[in-house]
Amino acid sequence: MEIDHVTHIFQCPRCRGILLWDQKKCSECKAPFRVEDGILDFVSYNTLSEQNRTQIELHKLLARDYQERYEPEYSKIYSRYWNRQFLSNMPEHPQSVLDNGCGTGELLKELLPHCNLPVGLDISKAMIKTAKDSIGEGKDIIWVVSPGESLPFADNIFDVICFRGALHHMSDEISALKEAYRVLKKNGLVMLSEPNDDSTLLRLPRKILNRRMARFGKDHKAFKSKKLLKSMEEIGFSIKYTKYFSFLSQPFCGMSDLIPLMKMLPFSRTIADLFVFVDEICSRLLIIKKQSFDLFVVAKKNFH
């Protein structure tokens, strides 16, 4: 999509000033931005938190790994299952959708037929480039490099904002949710799928991974449902739907680069389908549903 047609949706992420597109800077605070190979880059290292700078450097190394993670068929089965959580809750024919923290574009690929203005945003330019190359040229996607805590968009732009495993990577999730609220239209939806800290079975292994693996690290977060939902309500969202999501499919199919069991099993595609079937049953069982890997939430923007 030509950027010239959508310049009206953008504004300076620092001061909310008007952007001078011919000069590639803000009309008020003079903060610069870049447009390279169809990618709008609003990242300024001088204004980023330490965690955000760490995430940028980390994902320079992980972009290719993340793309390869979903190349096996059993991983694609999990990825499509994960995406269905978003697509099944999408309003009919939304005009504009922001994939906030789009990574390598696994969700964006499936969003394309469902909206007129898809926007893929990530703080990592390496991730954006990988997503852009994976999806291919000629697709009507606006590509933006920016932290989720300071979005370069005007108020009331998007019908839907998705966080597909992205919010926990951001240095300040409350600021990111407030920004999502700001740029959503009235009655717009935010959808998120994030690591579930209600699960007592996962707390110890998560702590071990955070200490021992660079791709996780001390900043890798998980969320307790009550605290997260309360924070969202305090911002102004009304919670429409929650689901404890993924028990077997994520660790074995979605993280096969870390847990390589599926690579060694015959009939791995059939096993992946079985895991998805079992996961759907587990998500409905009161006794065990809180032991899921992820929490999925749909919330609507209300005006105060």
Image (cartoon, helix red, strand yellow):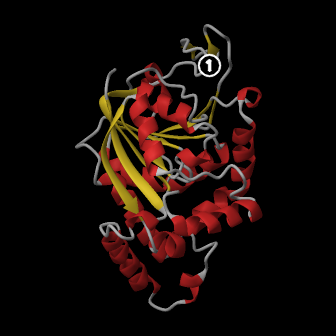
Q: Nearer the viewer, residue 128 or 101?
A: 101
Decide: few, some or many residues near mark 1? Use Cα within 10 Å; few <14, some 14-19, many ≥20: some
Quarter assignment of residue 263: bottom right
Q: Position of residue 226 (x, y in %)?
A: 43, 47
Q: Taking 91 as reference, is 59 above or below it?
A: below
Q: Please state which of residues 217 and 67 is positioned toward the viewer in this rendering.
A: 217
Q: Position of residue 229 (x, y in %)?
A: 41, 42
Residue 238 horizontal side relative to residue 12, left or right: left
Name the outermost residue toward the bottom: 266
From this view, report whether residue 90 is shown above or below residue 65: above
Indicate the secondary structure of the residue bearing disc 1: loop
Snapshot quadrant of residue 146: top right
Residue 176 drawn at (x, y percent): 53, 34
In the rendered picture of this protein, how many numbered marks are placed on residues? 1
Residue drawn at x 62%, y 49% as measured from the top left: 127
Relative side of 284 to 83, left or right: left
From the image, tell me which residue sits under label 1: 14
> Which quadrant does the C terminus fall into?
top left
Q: Is residue 242 left or right of residue 125?
A: left
Q: Is residue 70 visible?
A: no
Vertical position of residue 205 compared to residue 34: above or below: below
Residue found at the very far left of the displayed protein: 92
Nearer to me, 87 or 126:
87
Instruction: Answer whether residue 23 is visible to the viewer in this image.
Output: yes
Q: Is residue 51 left or right of residue 264?
A: right
Q: Residue at x 39, y 70 (%)?
A: 288
Counting from the top left corner in percent of width and height, residue 253 is at: 50, 74
Q: Amino acid at mark 1?
A: Arg
